[in-house]
Amino acid sequence: MPRFSEQFIQQVVQATDIVDLVSRHVALKRAGKEFVGLCPFHDDHKPSMHVVPAKQFFYCFVCGAGGGPIKFVELFERLEFVEAVEALAQRANIPVPAAADQAGPSGPGKNDLLKANAFAVNFYRSQLKSPCGKAALDYALSRGISQDSIDKFMLGYAPSHWDSLVQAAWKEKISEQVLVAAGLAARREGANGCYDRFRNRLMFPILDVEGRAIAFGGRALDPDEKAKYLNSPESPLFDKSSNLYGLTWSRKGIVASETAIVVEGYLDVLMPLQFGVSNIVATLGTALNERHVRLLSRYAKNIVLVFDSDAAGVSAADRALEIFMQQRINVNVASVPNGKDPCDFVLANGAEAFNGLVAAAPDAMQYVWNRQLEQFQKAGGNLADRHRIVEEFLRLVATSASYGAIDEIRRGQLAQHIGHMVNIAPVELARKMKSMVRTLKKPSVQDVGVSEGGPRLAFLNKSEAQALEVLLNRPDLFDNTAERIDPHDFEEPALRAIAGELWRLGHEGRGGLEELLACESMSQYAALLSELAAEGIGRGNFDETLAGAVQYLVYRRGRQKLTEMAGDLSDENLRNLGRVIPHRDVRRFPRNN
């Protein structure tokens, strides 16, 4: 079920002036009925982004980025569709409705869980400042965490009593059912009531990109406690495989530097942040996975993995590389020397030394090569082990190449390295790698319009595109058009998807560009929709263009019907031939259909 109703999204869009929105980030100059400025989504030196206030959309004629107000916020602030709608609603002082996908009578909704977590943040913080939290505060300060950082990162203390939070929440009319659903409490076995999940722990709130507490991590203060760190269980708010600790505070730094530093622990994030490193995050008790990579790629072009130099750290780096090497993102790997973790290293050496460690980190392939070379040398004369080591490295190179993570030049350099090591001609190794690449499954290519910078209108059927160009600019022509063609007449997948939504809205009398750009299902086609609209404005001659495009689509449908009938030349089909293909006026058809 959608997070927001179409009516609410339309209200938010109508309350947003796209010129005002874009001009907060880009200097715009009027050019006739439009505004132009440098595109913030590529290295633009000549104004190539156009903003059209009459139709509430923007479009860059160079990189292809485009859409309405929601898409601009998505791209500029690296948010998802729903997050962008919420951000625009807040800017327009429009109250955000309760989640449409809440659990209903059988369970608490997300807003209930967010309120419970917000209460818990304040409760834990108050306990840290109280006499009962003195030991926890002393521990935090002894680890080098400053009082300013304790306040900034909202650290707290979970008392050692079994039901301190439960009792405090009861006074605020927060039910046990909500506390359990939020992961703050657990049901007693064989008895009624609940008990606090976190007890006698230094508490680290885990926030989403909007700064809302969605979960907690707790560091045990009792040295005899078996679980040193305890995280909230997964909930409707929290998926540990899709969240990263510290992203709330590091997002702007990551975007500005185009680089994300990834570590493993809470303090490994907080200490560098305290010392001025602004682009660092950590996983949440789970190994890096593809969802983490997708999340990071929204903000960064480069990833630097920083792990401990012990065996566990090396193993974690190896697991992470298996995921990253299948992505089109630059990855470097740094190891903290002398067995230290990033927190201790920064405390001992400062931010400048840490930044130097990150800057000197070898790229992923060089890191793997160094590790494989060590193993190869340790293998000595054991030919089986040496052959296995080389095969593993070749397979990793081939996998990365198949996903486009390394290019032909880098592949050739690696072949040179391996050839020198095993005394095999590099040309033979290059041939073997190419063979491996061919046998590996290639990643699927996305449909047109799925991502910004994908194939543009030049690659699409002209009649299909021109029909949509006109309808996006002249929705008043929809009714007559819908009597002759429908979305099934569009063969291009992206154009058919757009036509389907346009026809749905058009039959409701609201099939304009603004309405389409406000549809969550159309978010992936925002750039294509903007390009279609911009091309239509530039072409003009709406009535004539639409007539020619529709006539061709009707003609093509008839030809396809004739092809289907060709194998069955019955008397009835022969009598129908004259009705199947309408008269074709070649002067009115766009070329190269």
Image (cartoon, rainbow, N blue to C red):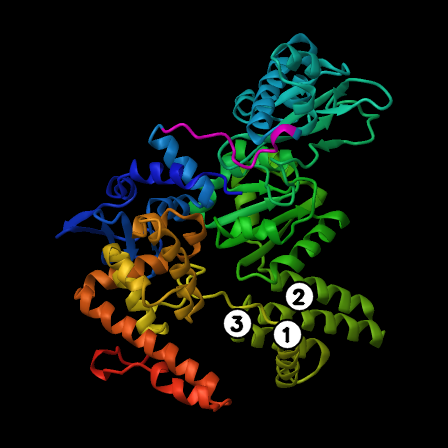
State how far apart marks 3 and 2 are (Cα). 16 Å
**Mark 2 = which residue?**
369
Q: Residue furthest left?
A: 32
Q: Residue 520: horizontal and vertical position, in percent?
A: 44, 48
SS class, disc 1: helix
What's the magenta bit mostly, secondary-structure-wise?
Answer: loop
Q: Is residue 342 left or right of residue 45?
A: right
Q: Can see residue 315?
A: yes
**Left-right relation of 373 to 48:** right
What kind of residue is marked 2?
Answer: Trp
Q: Identity of the amino acid at label 3? A: Asp
Which quadrant of the figure has residue 111? top right
Compare marks 3 and 2 and give the one earlier in the sequence: 2
Label 1 sits on residue: 417
Q: Which residues are magenta?
A: 94-105
Which image quadrant: the C terminus?
bottom left
- How far from the left and from the top, in percent, is residue 165? 68, 16
Above/below status of 200 relative to 526: above
**Circle 2: element type:** helix
Disc 1 crowd, CA 10 A, few/some/many (<14, 14-19, 20+): some
Residue 100: within the magenta?
Answer: yes
Which residue in the structure is indicated by mark 3? Answer: 407
Residue positioned 72% across, 16% down in the render = 159
When the figure is inspected, residue 248 is found, relative to residue 173, above or below; the finding is: below
Q: Is residue 565 above or below residue 482?
A: below
- The reply to whether discs 2 and 1 touch (Cβ–Cβ < 8 Å) is yes
